[in-house]
Image (cartoon, coloured by chain):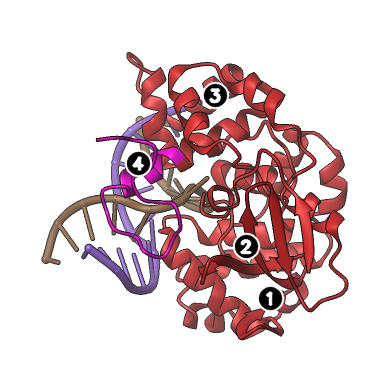
Chain colours: A red, B brown, C purple
Amino acid sequence: MLHVPATDFQLADTLTSGQTFRWRFKDGAFYGLICGCAVRVRQADSTLTVETVDSRLTEQDVIRYFSLDVDLAPLLASIDNDAQVHEAITRHRGLRIVRQDPWECLVCFICSSFNNIVRIQGMIERLCQEFGSPLSFNGFRGCSFPSAETMAHVPERRLRELGLGFRAPYLKRTARLVAEGKLPFEALRRTDYVVTKQALLRCDGVGDKVADCVALFGLQKYEAFPVDVWIERAMRYYFRTRRPTRARVHDFARRHFGRYAGWAQQYLYHDARTLRRAVRIDANLPGQGVRGRSS
DNA sequence: CGCCAGGTGCTGA
DNA sequence: TCAGCACATGGC
């Protein structure tokens, strides 16, 4: 059991903001994997409690995964450039971009195209149960994420049987590319955003939006600004006259928000979705109801 | 039944 | 460069 100091951090906002797909909330805690170790995580004030039976997990792993080493105040100040993003920051302050495994991140966001989050989660979970290794913990049955080598050898038909649809051939070809070492994640982590994005775009099933997600969530390219339907809607705020095409939105956002545009994107995205969801009932997620508004 | 979901690849001006 | 379309699947 690890107790990790976590100031200026909101676990629930972070794990329900759509950047990850495998965390599950149950009985007051989040169940998932950090660095391949099955964990149960909960937050009380400024302390994170991480339970695990895997002795390999260190406090440093947790700090790194949740980006607790990032000084949030100056970062948020740098993107706090208009009333809309200011509201989003105020409502969800403490939301952080996590550091995901780039391969897992790539697969998840290839699955995300033309899809909804609930179904993406199901697809990923079936993929792990079928081709990952079992990892149980406190009655929580988890699975490791299948390697690129494993997925490169799975027949496309088997992927389709998991409900992956037209993404099956994309995943298969991308897995082969990664297994052959033609997408060197660790090298990309050290290079700049433009080169990284170019490399990601060579994968099948990866366009501008997915490449930006992997660059942002998997490789910490904080300038990356993924533009999906939700962000497109939120960005109409800045486009009173011209029609906000995705290319124009992307260009504008990187100029308007600067080096940490990706963080602005995540706050805007999460805020837009929680506002929409506030009128529905969603008992699966904590703190996602009507919050911070009086009427 | 129609519409929507964290889009991408392909085609034709 | 850019609009128009097909693409699997499930929830509402």
Quadrant location of residue A143?
A: bottom right
User: Dot 2 lies on which element?
Assistant: helix
Q: Which residue is tagged 3?
A: A253
Real-space Cα distance between discs 2 and 1?
A: 10 Å
Res. A226 visible in picture: yes
Q: Position of residue A73 (x, y in %)?
A: 68, 27
Real-space Cα distance between discs 4 and 3?
A: 21 Å
Quadrant location of residue A104?
A: bottom right
Quadrant including the C terminus of chain A = top left
Is C2 left or right of A72, judged from the image as shown? left
Q: Name which residue lies at 63% across and 70% down.
A: A172
Q: Is residue A50 magenta?
A: no
- Residue under disc 1 on the same chain as residue under disc 4: yes
Q: Which residue is tagged 4?
A: A275
Q: Mark 2 belongs to which amino acid?
A: Val
Q: Name which residue lies at 77% across and 59% down.
A: A3
Earlier sequence position, callout 1 versus callout 4: 1
Mark 4 Cα within 10 Å, few/some/many (few <14, many 20+)? some
Q: Are marks 2 and 1 in contact (CB under 8 Å)?
A: yes
Q: Which residue is tagged 1?
A: A151
| A40 to A250, vertically: above or below | below
User: Dot 1 lies on which element?
Assistant: helix
Q: Position of residue A291 (x, y in %)?
A: 38, 42
Which of the labelled discs sits on residue A217, or is there none? none
Real-space Cα distance between discs 2 and 3?
A: 26 Å
Earlier sequence position, callout 1 versus callout 3: 1
User: Dot 3 lies on which element?
Assistant: helix
Q: Position of residue A176 (x, y in %)?
A: 73, 68
Which of labels 1 and 3 is toward the front? Answer: 3
Earlier sequence position, callout 4 versus callout 3: 3
Res. A106 visible in picture: no
Which range of residues does the magenta coloring cover? A271-295
